[in-house]
Amino acid sequence: MFTDSVELTVSSGKGGQGCVAFRREKFVLNGGPNGGDGGKGGDVYFKCDNNTHTLSHFQRRMHIKADGGVQGEGSRMTGKSGAKKIIIVPPGTQIIDTETGEILFDMIKDGQEEKFLQGGKGGLGNTHFKSPTNQRPTYAQPGEKGETRSIKLDLKLIADIGLVGFPNVGKSTLISTVSNARPEIANYEFTTLTPKLGQVNIGDFESYVMADIPGIIGGAHEGKGLGIKFLRHIERTKILLYMVDLASYRDLKEQIETLKSEIASFSEKMGENKYAIALTRVDVIPIEDRAELVKSFLDLLGLEATKSNEFKFDNDMPFFIQDSANETLGFDRNLPYLVAPISSATFTNIEALKYSLFNLVQADRI
């Protein structure tokens, strides 16, 4: 089960109590105090691990505690310190204070480790309290209490490209075609109920990550449909791929304007992201109508078809792509980087889309 938000109470370990003891040896009269200190309580750490992808393992663990320190012993022996508690979270997890709403840590990189709570100090044994006027102290310090905080864990997946589209537009089919993700695919709306990540491999040494979320409908930013719940999973992405269904009963203009409006309403920052547009299910359109339909969409955006074909798009249909020679200056955010018809079923323009998006990802990483 995919879980992306949980609330927890976390406590560090209590320090061990100091010991009250006196030296007792043969031939030693009136041995002085020698009670040892209590051990330190365990600290609490958060650690980011790429092998974890959900917060579901926290659902039944409402209170996580580190071990306490062990009581000190005679002969000035210090008690054992409590073991530190390491809480494993997936990349993209934010640790938020539930009282203030402050983001305490943002766990992004694999292996990242952050100290969250300090364990309590161990109490001093009675050996620390001897003095010329008190040569037989009969008391020791209790260990200090550990810290306790209420927190919320929010998971926001990390991806290079986020897929955005209406339900049943072909997002799951695309991500299963170009990556290692295997989402459920069916011919009905809202097949995707949870976000999916897929790694798109480019040759042997290069790749990028694509994120698929449930379909968005008009009014999603107000809570309609499923998309609003998972839009935060593409908040970290700097590139969006809007998917417009050529064979949908919805008008093409309505689709792209609704999607862009919902994204901008959810997050003004996301609305300014670089973006590309994939015109899906071109295989369903009669061959003689495909070119004209794509051209009409380009005209709608005020774009002219690109003549250069660096990424080997299908020449039978028009497409638009910003000149990669300008990537050092940065692509124009006011225009789509790419507009191209595709079909995951017949693999039309899929390879060209994959490599052209990688070109955009690379330019963004510089």
Image: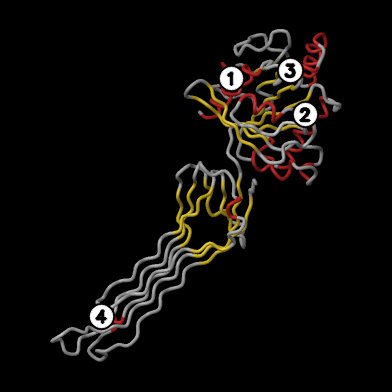
Q: Earlier in the sequence, mark 3 or mark 2?
A: 2
Residue 163 occupies quadrant: top right
Quarter of the image holding residue 75?
bottom left
Mark 4 to mark 2: distance in Å? Answer: 78 Å
- Disc on res. 303: 3
Task: Give the residue at mark 4.
Answer: 34
Q: In the rendered view, does 241 fall on the left or right side of 247?
A: left
Mark 3 → mark 2, Cα distance in angstroms: 15 Å
Q: Position of residue 46 (x, y in %)?
A: 49, 53
Label disc, if present, on residue 355 of the rendered structure: 1
Spatial separation of the CA atoms under disc 2 and disc 1: 23 Å
Please give the name of the residue rendered at 49% of the width and 42% of the height, measured from the top-left corner. Answer: 109
Quick check: 105 above or below 296? below
| x and y, in percent, of residue 257 in the image | 79, 31
Task: Give whichever of discs 1 and 3 has the lower sequence position.
Answer: 3
Q: Nearer the viewer, mark 1 or mark 4?
A: 4
Which amino acid type corresponds to the residue marked 3 in the rendered image? Leu
Cα distance between the residues tagged 1 and 4: 73 Å
Look at discs 3 and 4 and give the one toward the viewer. 4
Query: In terms of secondary structure, where does tag 1 sit?
Result: helix
Residue located beneath label 2 in the image = 256
Instruction: Judge whether residue 363 can be spotted in this image.
Output: no
Distance (Cα) linking label 1 and label 3: 22 Å
Q: By what rule are the colours in the image chosen?
A: secondary structure
Q: Secondary structure at mark 3?
A: loop
Let me know if residue 237 appears in the view. yes
